[in-house]
Amino acid sequence: MSQATVKCLLVDDLEENLLALSALLGREGVEILTARSGSEALELLLEHEFALALLDVQMPEMDGFQLAELMRGSERTRHIPLIFVTATSRDQHRLFKGYETGAVDFLYKPVEPHILRNKAEVFFQLHRQKQELAQQLHERTEALRLNEMFMAVLGHDLRDPLHAIVLSASLLQTQSSDPKIRKTTDMVLASGMRMTRMIEDLLEAARARLGGGIPVRPERMDMSLLLQRVLDECRAGNPGRQAELLLQGDTQGEWDPDRMGQVVANLVGNAFHHGESGVPLQVLLDGSQPDQFRLSFVNAGRIAPELLPHIFDPFRSGQGRSGRGLGLGLYIVQQVVLAHGGGIDVHSGEDQRIRFEIWLPRQSKAS
């Protein structure tokens, strides 16, 4: 793959000097533009983007120092690296003046070709990297724009017709006694609710990744009441599964009840689906510490070692193989816990037990 072309500006009032410098620096991937005065150089600077400019110090009308000051005063050209080239003897005052005007180097004629090529190549490579980063930024910005459009479609154009489908199926189910029709409407309702959950998960994930986290609205609540309610709902939807709730200490605190309900429902549903059916899920709530609150979900089963480090990654492999989800549930759980100022971890070892542990401040940092 050929390198991206960069442009180099040479400014000198003598044609022979421009020809010599052009011969030294010109090669594939480098375009040389020349100017024989400061005013010509300014015209080129308005039209082109340069990776490097070599300025002769002594020129009539506008010398190299004056041109450099004008370049540094413009937003468009202030970041172009400048190298001064002069045929005069070494003068400390002139050297300091060159650096004060923004030069990155000061070379004396006759210029050593090897040194000049190496110095110039450094700035050419830096400019290419800058161009690549700008392209990557443009591509990512475009990807974010497309993602926002995609989320708008999910949030409106898909949810509204899906809602109509679910309502129509519900109405048909209540008005028909035909077993075949009821069986069909049951399937439509189940699929519609599943699609609704997937869309909500996608929207939550997008809000977390684009908005810097999931927003929470903490209020005073009793975690034990929320746990009991969510467990009852999950048992009703999974009649063959059992769950035990163990309480310890003060169960009061300040959290977002809706978001914490999401966390509990996701973890309980995950345990019911992936855990062994003959062993009850244990939910342990420890409020014995004054400032910290711990919540554990323990069920029989095992997470593959290669999956464990990525268990909270969105769209991770292994989640959703059964067709029940997109692999976003645990990611959303993690984001809600982090938004409360807490943390979450998972353990799975030789004892064939999976343990999700959550720790939360008694008073959410978001409050």
Image (tube, rainbow, N blue to C red):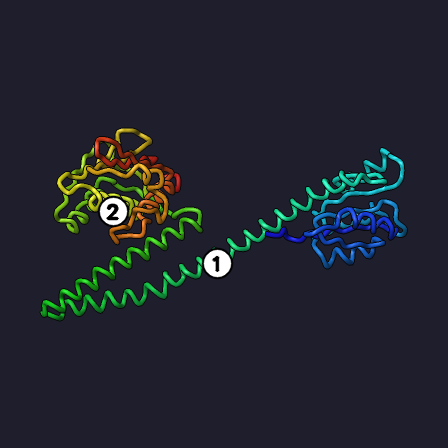
User: For residue 248, what is the image quadrant?
Assistant: top left
Tell me which residue sits at (76%, 39%) in the image: 114
Tell me which residue sits at (61%, 51%) in the image: 131
Q: CA distance from mark 2 to mark 1?
A: 32 Å
**Tag 2: Cα neighbours inside 10 Å, few (<14), some, or many (≥20)?**
many
Residue 264: x %, y % from top left: 26, 44
Q: Which residue is mark 1?
A: 145
Q: Secondary structure at mark 2?
A: helix
Numbered mark located on residue 117 in the image = none
Does residue 146 appear to the left or right of 313 in the view shown? Answer: right
User: For residue 333, what is the image quadrant?
Assistant: top left
**Tag 1: Cα neighbours inside 10 Å, few (<14), some, or many (≥20)?**
few
Q: Which residue is mark 2?
A: 265
Q: Is residue 226 visible?
A: no
Tell me which residue sits at (78%, 58%) in the image: 43
The amino acid beneath tag 1 is Arg
Q: Secondary structure at mark 1?
A: helix
Does residue 158 appear to the left or right of 136 in the view shown? Answer: left
Residue 254: x %, y % from top left: 32, 40
Quarter in which the C terminus is drawn: top left
Query: Which numbered disc, 2 or 1, marks the residue closer to the eye?
Result: 1
Tell me which residue sits at (27%, 37%) in the image: 356
Give the mark nearer the N terminus: 2 vs 1: 1
Does residue 125 appear to the left or right of 54 in the view shown? Answer: left
Residue 338: x %, y % from top left: 37, 40
Name above or below for residue 172 compared with residue 154.
below
Q: Is residue 365 visible?
A: yes
The amino acid beneath tag 2 is Ala
For the residues bearing labels 2 and 1, Cβ distance under 8 angstroms = no
